[in-house]
Image (cartoon, helix red, strand yellow):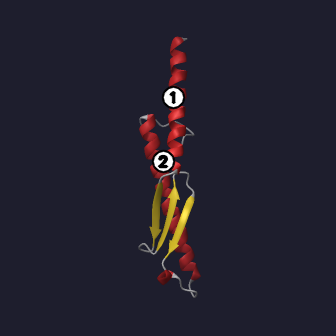
Amino acid sequence: MKGMGNMMKQAQKLQAKMAKMQEELADRSVEGSSGGGMVKVVANGRQQVLSIAIEKEVVDPEDLEMLQDLVLAAVNDALSKSQEMVASEMGKLTGGMNIPGLF
């Protein structure tokens, strides 16, 4: 039974470390882009989009679909990079263990 108590303490410590890491990741950001950097999106570790920057050269009133595609691609790039950042940092805490439902 003593082994089970130690395991529970370790799990609680890991949970506290993970909560702290999630808070820290919320303050970190990554940038995604598309169109050779013409559209840039910044997202944080909570997968929240913080900003979108669009160069005026890419804005063509006659081709809104292209601009929409560029924004979508940049958002997806930023969110993908954010997820990779979170998985990498959490992997350091868990020692590479794949814990279901963690990410």
What is the crowding at mark 2: few (fewer than 14 residues within 10 Å), some, or many (at least 20)? many
Tell me which residue sits at (50%, 25%) in the image.
10
Please provide percent x and percent y for residue 31.
46, 62
Of the numbered discs in the image, which one, if any, rests on residue 44?
none
For the view shown, which residue lies furthest in the top direction?
A: 1
Tell me which residue sits at (54%, 33%) in the image.
15
What is the crowding at mark 1: few (fewer than 14 residues within 10 Å), some, or many (at least 20)? few
Please provide percent x and percent y for residue 98.
48, 37
Task: Identify whether 23 is placed above or below 68.
Answer: above
Real-space CA distance between mark 2 and mark 1, rounded to the nearest whole angstrom = 19 Å
Tell me which residue sits at (43%, 72%) in the image.
37
Q: Nearer the viewer, residue 12 or 79?
A: 12
Q: Amino acid at mark 1?
A: Lys
Q: Quadrant of the N terminus?
A: top right
Of the numbered discs in the image, which one, if any, rests on residue 13?
1
Tell me which residue sits at (45%, 35%) in the image.
94
Q: Secondary structure at mark 1?
A: helix
Task: Identify whether 16 is placed above or below 88.
Answer: above
Q: Amino acid at mark 2?
A: Val
Task: Identify whether 15 is placed above or below 74.
Answer: above
Please provide percent x and percent y for residue 101.
57, 40
Tag 2 residue: 86
Left or right: residue 64 versus residue 95 is: right
Left or right: residue 62 versus residue 37 is: right
Would you say the residues marked 2 and 1 are in contact, meaning their CB atoms lie under 8 Å apart? Answer: no
Q: Nearer the viewer, mark 2 or mark 1?
A: 1
Q: Secondary structure at mark 2?
A: helix
Left or right: residue 12 versus residue 97 is: right
Please provide percent x and percent y for residue 96.
42, 37
Whichever of labels 2 and 1 marks the residue nearer the N terminus, that label is 1
Q: How many numbered circles are shown?
A: 2
